Amino acid sequence: VKIISLVLNNFASYYGDHTFDFDTDTGNDGYAIFGHEGTGKSSIMWAILWCLYGKVEATHLYEGEMKSMNRPVLDASQMGGSYKKKWYAPLLTDKAFESKEYNISVTLTFEHNGQRFVLLRKAKATKSNPINDTDMKIKAHLSVDNTTISTALIDGVIEEIIPQRVSRFFFIEMDALDQYANLLFGSEPGSAVREDVESILGLPAIDRSEDDFRRLAKSAEGDVTKHKKKESTDKKTLKKIKSAEETKKEIKKDLREFNNDIKGANKRIEEIDIILSTESTAKELLEKKETTEKRIKELEAELDKLYIDRAEMMSGTLWMSLIQSNLETVMDNLDERNKEKDELVTKAVKAEQQIVFKQSLLDKGSTECEACGHTTEGIGTDERDEVAAQVAELNESHNSLRKEIDTFGDPVGSIIALSKFRNSTGHSSVMDTDHFIGEKIVKIGTNNKRLNGISDELENHDVSLIAILSREKVSLIELRGDQKAGKSAAKKFLQSIEATHKRLVGKLPSGSGSTKVKEAELREKVFLWLSDTFQQSLELYLAEARESVQKQSTETFLATIPESAKYKGITISENWEIEVIGVNNKPKVIINPGHKQVIAVSLFDGLRETSRRTFPTFFDNPGSNIADETLAKVAKHFWGIERGQIVMLSHGGGLKTDETIESYGDKLACAWELSYVSGEETLTQIEKLL
Amino acid sequence: MRMTGMNDERPDIRKTIRGVLDSSKSPVPLEDDEKDEIIDLCIKFQYSTNRDEFRKKILKLVTSAVNRALLSR
């Protein structure tokens, strides 16, 4: 990676636009930026970090513990005066905040693998009076060779070029390096340091992958168990599927048989219909006969019902209604008989009177007839015999009349006795029922006559054949109905079996159970193999990397440490613990903080070089603890090697501007001097020296 | 002497891993491209906080090789 330019706008002390143009045709990769404390040297590093990752981490030592926090873009509580600033000061220029210019941006242009990248990160307020970052909208834009990269991909692209995790090895804050160096000299460097070191060397590529391979092997092992279990279940399912298939076959066979039977029945019915059509008269007669018989049965049933109704009506006192008509007749007859009796009685009385009269004639000579008033004067013998004969005849007649009268009995008494049964209630309904009964009987009779006529006519036809065929047809129709019902049921059953079959087949995996097991077993083996090979790779690469770092660090150390002849080099333990070895092959105790810084710088250099990552390296404030001689050697060494851009951000106590330009001017591509704007002690201005 | 240049003695993580992979017999044959892809993925995802995607891609690659091996048997 080679930085082409850096443009800051309202970033930290850079109010308005400020550009650092790194692109020169000098062929040099050395850069020097001079400036007193607070003039904006470190802000250049922070601007690049913010542009790359969207955040700048501030660190702070508090009660022996290192604290870190992301610096806000805007924090109104800290703005408007340096006395308000906390250790995590906001990135927006104070002056911009005061002028209500709530926008900030950094544009980094660089080359990587022959392509030109332009990365812009900017933030602007979403409210008229923003209070903090929640009122700011931060956006990034990246173009590669003038092609815009999707916002979602920007972080990934930047991570591939320079992962944030390893950026500390390229943006070296020398003051913080002191503490880092102390950690390296500890009996066992902390895990954070070890992780940092291993990160830049790319060990996570092996280490984390190995861990994942083991997980994947474990997952495959689980799959083996699962598939074996499933295989057993699958066998049961297969058995059920086979059974379902057998049933399907059976049903289909039944369906074919049903179809054949129905077809056969249809054919036979057609044949019968043809035969019966030639005997249409007989058929009609048979139908008439059947209809008439049916009608007779209906009438008989209706008649039975009427009888039942009548019997029900008769129960209780209704019987009296029934006898009314006869009662009237009887009473009329009795009345007639009474009249006849009365006539006979009259006759008998007359006869008695005549007898009495005649007898008196016989008994007295003359006698007045009480009936007619005739007075006789007495009769002679002849006449007497004649009258006696008449009396005898009258007695006989009278006796006969009396006998006849006796035969009449007592009609009046009977009439009186029957009178108490005279009642007309319900008479009409019984009469109606009787009427209907009579009607039905007549109809039955009529139909029976018709039936006899039909039967007589049928004697001229082959009735038995027609009857047989008709019965056969009826039977066939019934059979066909049964077959259709059977077919419908079979179809439904088939559908049900097919659904079951489909469900069971769906339960089976796409491959056979045993294949799945084999696949999972093999997959487990491959992941275990990968895990093993990566474990071996890790051990091998770690040893190679440590040796390389040790070699590179020693080279840099010996090139930058004063009195290098006293030292043999640097050794690095498996825990990345550093020891400086003297020429006598014995470890040397390093107390000088400047020397410790040099060792840390050397180690970082060894790590950068071994990692094969090429990114501009920034040394912020070199010389804070380093003697001038050492600093000169450091500058000479790093600006002298052809290994990408090296940017030294130096204050007055470090590299001296004039001396540096004079001593290393031929190694430098650019040099700038930073200072405050006149009258504005918080705003930076840039002067290009080279 | 810097290690950069023609006689580069610096370790190369790709070569190291590849060397070990080549020297050990894999349970299923792996193409050279597949080995390189595995290494590429390992390096690409080395700082990734979400490992799911890495595992998914590796699983797909290995499963493909395993199925190919099973088919060839």
Image (cartoon, coloured by chain):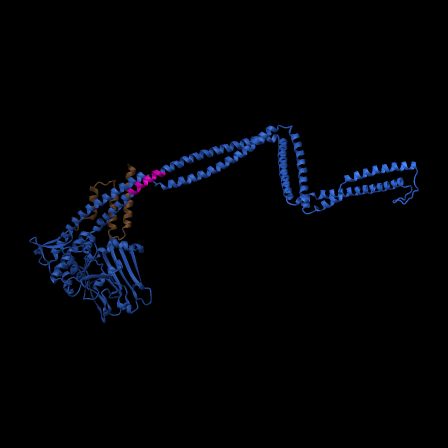
- Quick one: quadrant of the N terminus of chain A? bottom left
Per the picture, the main secondary structure of the magenta-coloured stretch is: helix
- The reply to whether the magenta stretch includes residue A231 is yes
- The reply to whether the magenta stretch includes residue A11 is no
Q: Chain A colour?
A: blue
- Whether residue A360 is visible, yes or no, is yes
- Quick one: quadrant of the C terminus of chain A? bottom left
Instruction: From the top left corner, tell me how far across and down residue A268 is, in percent.
Output: 54, 31
Q: Is residue A470 above or below residue A85?
A: above
Instruction: From the top left corner, tell me how far across and down residue A194 is, in percent.
Output: 18, 54
Residue drawn at point x = 73 percent, y = 46 percent: A416
Instruction: From the top left corner, tell me how far across and down residue A600 is, in percent.
Output: 15, 57
Pick out the residue farthest to the left: A584
Instruction: From the top left corner, tell me how far across and down residue A20 is, in percent.
Output: 23, 62
Q: Is residue A418 above or below residue A149?
A: above
- Locate residue A183: give its quadrant: bottom left
Q: Chain B colour?
A: brown
Q: Which residues are magenta?
A: A224-237
